[in-house]
């Protein structure tokens, strides 16, 4: 059954030709009506925003248009009625002030008292909405009850999604990846996880900013979210399945900012868990929306792939360096950078179970070994933010190697090398600062015992903030400059991300302590 | 003499209906030609990008149009000539591959060898540019010589600006602010500095993203950068002086991203030092441009005002919290947050003398005391990133208070209070991490002696990264959550930014050490 329900979308454009600082003539010459028409909108004009009959007529025309959104351009005068500030940018950002308010009331024939006066007609008009709102609510509830009776399974699913509860046993769909030294990119693991869980988690709706072949975030066969009116001949890139509003794959286009904003709207509506993907370096383009998601405690998932200088040939414009630090600085955002395929599965689990705020998954472009969990700690340690992945061999650790993402397997190799030199090194995988900080002190002290001062953090990103974890006697192998145009592996080696360099830095750290 | 020189601006739009991931039909329904027409562009169309005569004709028509920019929409086929990939998104992001290259050459009637083949006609055509380029260069040089003879003063100024040298003695124009407990906002001090130095530093060109009344970045009387063809009746917000391309005030409008991009273009052109202003919380909107400026080592100045939760009533959406940390994470960007009016003057001096990269000035909305430099260290300490503003009274410090911006005067009050309780506290003003990190170790150890472990950093922003300066035994009074809707002073008090709370935290720190 094609899904093509649509209602009128109406945008009221208050065209008063004034911005905070100036008349819009100083910075704005476009023809707004023609611009929106070029986007495929119906454009209506109201010559005088105080002419209620004209406004009413435009609203009614807009309500009748279901096939395209409507922009109603309404000419108004800012600060209407104020004898000295009407039509002035002074009326934009500052209050009129007591004297000017008095003059305005006088000019409009309003009583000077009370200060906050509501005319009886206005009150009566607004109160009518109580009655009509109650009727609308009752009608909606009756419709929902009817739906519950006719479609009990769909209604139960709707209730589940609105309540934010995940289906019982959904985690059984999370894949378990066998140990594999060649491994796979965490973006690829993420793609498998998504496609395994999507059939059961119908609330998952999302896509990428024109990067599906790279971020691997397409839900195969789950439909393309499109207007069924548009039936283009060329559907290259379509995911397949229904081509209508039931499609769960959103083609955001090269519009990271809009993607972030749309995700917020979907999450605020409820019953949907939106995900949106792009390269980590482009996370900057949606920061304002990420900030709002965190501020509002919205539940949604960002999938940021191509997460370090290991991106390679595209060079420093495409190699994220400061982005991990910049994302971690946002209060309320949980950032998770898994080390292998199984940590990626747990990261998705955390992201979906964490209902009270947004989560950013930071994933590699390049293959990473799938770690052998029969000899290493289980990947569900991700839930605790950081965990002892490999204990020091032969006694208390001389040194702790802390790493995230693609650097974890390097730390494991370094641990082996250090063992050969008689150094007992513990490897801590730390995919998420926020999850670790939320654990009790006892657990944190277990993972990073205060008495072990030799700590080396290894992460292919800005070192900013790592000193809190490694302490004064510790060190960080990070990236505090821009990347370089080179094959990914060569860039990583040149920037010191090799097990040899980790060993050297670790030994220097122990040296310094003696 | 009105300045109205303009040349043709031509944008070639390669319309191949393919994006990285898909046919553009999946995410793009706008009528691009009508959209650009609505912006006031001339729009021309070329039906076949391989029709050189048609292209030539469009280019010539575009060159003749000087009063508006021209968009030439050129229909092309991506991967032209490739039998299996022409018109496909596979030809966008990946190489064709050796086999398909062979098939393409075959189809086009090209020789299979050499692999990188340049047809003789193409070579000859391109090499013609050498000759015409040399002629154009010679003509330009002759024109410049003529200009030098006719306008020696203007030519000398042009040479100075292109070379990036500041005029001798320009610093004399920097205002010195008298000590004043009431003081003024650092944004206000910045406005005075700018207007004092602008007449002498003609390379300063800039403005704000529709926030001149708030960021105080207008250059009074220095003209509005506008097309002289546009002569609007309403010029509210105009700065005054010439209304043409000699205007040094750019009205960027509510377009932070475009402001950042335009600044980069101006700086890359040379002979101009652009500045651009907005609220610190909106710095997120121009991060991609800031990153590129830092990557390219462009010299320009960002003026970010309203720099903390002290912004007040506008609430958490307008109160920056994580932005200082996020900006500091960008390699090559120098961030300076001055503590008072005189530090602001030095910050501008540093920003203008630092030719090898962008500088962000972080300024307060609220008044800050102008510190009494007759009893405190001089404000030129800003050049060193951090300096001892007030030494501990009566011997070696028990404790170091490190603060930036609006929190420095609080730290000074706390120092007095601590003195009353027998605690010797040093106050370090640290307006810039980057400038401090660039100083020799000796200097850094002088300011923050390694043996003084009790260190308290106070900054109304994310604590991320401060642990590197305060060490394991230190502490940070920062803001690791979102702000709140309240008067600025009330918000600051509720978040612990009072001299009393600083004292309490300082005493707790000393307690913990014993």
Image (cartoon, coloured by chain):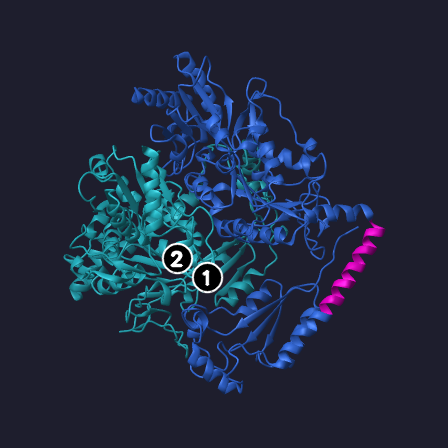
Chain colours: A blue, B cyan
Compared with A155, A443 (above or below) is: above
Q: Which residue is mark 2?
A: B310
Q: Which residue is mark 1?
A: B314
Chain under numbered label 2: B
**Within 10 angstroms of label 2, few (less than 14), some, or many (20 or more) residues?**
many
Quadrant for residue A462, please give it.
Answer: top left
Residue B369 relative to residue A192: left or right: left
Percent x, y for residue B77? Answer: 57, 48
Question: Mark 2 near mark 1, Cβ–Cβ under 8 Å?
Answer: no
Disc number for residue A250: none
* Main secondary structure along the magenta-highlighted residues: helix
Q: Residue at x 28, y 70 (%)?
A: B220
Percent x, y for residue A94? Answer: 43, 71
Residue B359 relative to residue A266: left or right: left
Quadrant for residue A90, please give it.
Answer: bottom left
- Res B79 seen here: no
Q: How many badges with numbers are in the image?
A: 2
- Res A162 seen here: yes
Quadrant for residue B184, please give it.
Answer: bottom left
Percent x, y for residue A469? Answer: 41, 32
The one nearer the camera, B346 or A489, is B346
The one nearer the camera, A277 or B265, is A277
Query: What's drawn in magenta, residue-wise?
Result: A132-151
Chain under numbered label 1: B
Secondary structure under the numbered disc 1 in the rendered image: loop
* Magenta highlight on residue A459: no
* Magenta highlight on residue A150: yes
The one nearer the camera, B344 or B229, is B344
């Amino acid at each position: 059954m094609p899904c093509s329900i649509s209602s009128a979308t109406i945008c009221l454009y208050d065209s008063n030709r004034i911005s905070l600082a100036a008349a819009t003539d100083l910075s704005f010459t476009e023809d707004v009506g023609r611009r929106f028409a070029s986007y495929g909108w119906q454009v209506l004009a109201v010559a005088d925003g105080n002419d209620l009959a004209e406004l009413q007529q435009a609203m009614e025309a807009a309500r009748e248009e279901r096939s395209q959104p409507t922009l109603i351009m309404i000419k108004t005068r800012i600060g209407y009625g104020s004898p000295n500030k009407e039509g002035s940018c002074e009326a934009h950002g500052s209050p009129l002030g007591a004297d000017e308010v008095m003059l305005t009331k006088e000019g409009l024939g309003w009583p000077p008292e009370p200060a906050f006066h509501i005319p009886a007609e206005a009150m009566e008009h607004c109160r009518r909405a109580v009655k009509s709102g109650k009727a609308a609510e009752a009608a909606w509830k009756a419709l929902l009850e009817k739906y519950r009776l006719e479609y009990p399974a769909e209604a139960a699913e709707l209730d589940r999604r609105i309540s934010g509860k995940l289906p019982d046993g959904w985690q059984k769909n999370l894949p378990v990846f066998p140990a594999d030294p060649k491994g796979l990119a965490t973006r690829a693991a993420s793609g498998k996880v998504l496609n395994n869980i999507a059939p059961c988690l119908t609330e998952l709706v999302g896509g990428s900013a024109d990067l599906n072949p790279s971020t691997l975030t397409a839900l195969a066969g789950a439909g393309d979210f499109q207007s069924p009116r548009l039936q283009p001949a060329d559907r290259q890139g379509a995911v397949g399945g229904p081509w209508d509003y039931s499609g769960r794959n959103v083609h955001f286009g090269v519009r990271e900012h809009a993607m972030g904003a749309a995700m917020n709207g979907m999450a605020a509506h409820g019953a949907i868990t939106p995900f949106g993907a792009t390269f980590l370096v482009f996370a900057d383009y949606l920061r304002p929306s990420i900030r709002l998601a965190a501020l509002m405690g919205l539940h949604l998932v960002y999938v940021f792939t191509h997460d370090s200088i290991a991106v390679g040939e595209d060079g420093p414009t495409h190699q994220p360096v400061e982005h991990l630090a910049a994302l971690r600085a946002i209060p309320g955002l949980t950032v998770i950078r898994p080390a292998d395929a199984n940590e990626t599965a747990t990261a998705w689990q955390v992201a979906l179970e964490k209902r009270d705020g947004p989560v950013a998954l930071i994933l590699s472009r390049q293959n990473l070994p799938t770690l052998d969990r029969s000899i290493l700690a289980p990947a569900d340690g991700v839930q605790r933010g950081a965990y002892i992945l490999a204990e020091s061999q032969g006694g208390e650790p001389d040194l702790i190697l802390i790493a995230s993402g693609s650097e974890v397997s390097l730390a494991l190799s370094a641990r082996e090398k250090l063992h050969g030199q008689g150094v007992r090194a513990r490897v801590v995988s730390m995919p998420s600062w926020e999850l670790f900080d939320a654990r009790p002190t006892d657990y944190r002290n277990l993972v990073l015992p205060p008495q072990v001062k030799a700590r080396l953090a290894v992460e292919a990103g800005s070192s900013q903030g790592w000193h809190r974890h490694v302490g004064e006697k510790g060190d960080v192998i990070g990236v505090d400059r821009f990347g370089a145009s080179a094959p990914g592996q060569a860039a990583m080696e040149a920037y010191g991300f090799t097990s040899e360099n980790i060993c050297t830095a670790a030994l220097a750290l122990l040296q310094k302590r003696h």
